[in-house]
Image (cartoon, rainbow, N blue to C red):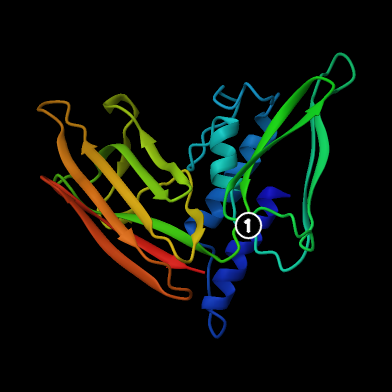
Amino acid sequence: MICESVRFTEISEQLAANRWGETYPRGRMIGLQNAWRSISGGMMQANENAADGPLHVRHNDLRINTPRTAAAVLGIMTIEAADSFAFIVNLKDYDYVSSDDNIAKGTIIRDAYNIANEYDKAITETIKGASGAVTLHHIVLSDAAQALVEVILIKGDGEDPANVYGHITAYNEHGDSDIFRKPDSDSYIDVSPNTPIPLSRSATTMPMTGALTINALLYNYDSISSDNEIANGKDVFKPAIGKSESQSIRGAYGEISVRVTWT
């Protein structure tokens, strides 16, 4: 269901932008489908302690290989609700020898008409089961916007492709999250100029009164000489529903463009 909701969002946006002519699936749309197929076939178990444990999955373009990266790429989406809503959790651990174990099962209801509701603050709740538990982190914002982030490599030390590693972080008043993290030169990825840098997460939500800060520190790996800096700095974006804005972050030997679209 997570994959379907993301995939259908991509399809809807594609059709809306090309309603009068011919259109073809975008690379990310195809990547989402292929990555979900890989992870669906390879996920053997999941519990509250396995978020960073590798799964038995085939290679995919979105580099999904742990439950955490799966959730980040395929499942973390903002939800706009005009009425009450609920989080329904029913997770099991598959066992081909004995019966499946119940990791966590339960429902958290957000009643829009409850005058005791808390808004604009982080809420953490735990749902338990016979063989485990999950922790649900969420924020119910009273007046919010969704930011869709895209990062384009403009120049990568004059190389094509550049061997990119480092980190990109999205920050607002409720905290920060890594949207790109390749901590060292052993984990670099190949990115050509004027193409997107694959992000582990592209959507984030924030209050209309706040600001989104994108911090980037990226390098190009060089097997012969020292690694060179591609980008080092930050961009700040103010919410503006229905609009897009692009800013640049430069380094000593490169540049990236950060584009934020507000919905």
Q: How many marks?
A: 1
Q: Residues within 10 Å of mark 1 (few under 14, many from 20)?
A: some
| 178 with respect to 33 (left or right) | left
Q: Residue at x 26, y 63 (%)?
A: 247
Q: Position of residue 156 (x, y in %)?
A: 19, 47
Q: Residue furthest toward the front?
A: 116
Q: Position of residue 86 (x, y in %)?
A: 78, 52
| 95 with respect to 170 (left or right) | right
Q: Residue furthest toward the bottom?
A: 20
- Disc 1 marks a residue whose amino acid type is Arg
Work out whether residue 103 can be spotted: no
Q: Position of residue 160 (x, y in %)?
A: 21, 46
Work out whether residue 74 can be spotted: yes
Q: Residue furthest toward the top?
A: 97
- Image quadrant where residue 150 sits: bottom left
Q: Residue at x 34, y 43 (%)?
A: 168
Secondary structure state at the residue bearing disc 1:
helix
Whether residue 225 is situated above or below residue 13 in the rendered picture: above
- The residue lying toward the viewer, choosing from 93 and 116, is 116
- The residue lying toward the viewer, choosing from 212 and 143, is 143
Q: Position of residue 80 (x, y in %)?
A: 65, 64
Judging by the rendered image, the residue that carries numbered circle 1 is 7
Whether residue 219 is situated above or below residue 155 in the rendered picture: above
Q: Residue at x 70, y 31 (%)?
A: 134
Q: Residue at x 42, y 75 (%)?
A: 243
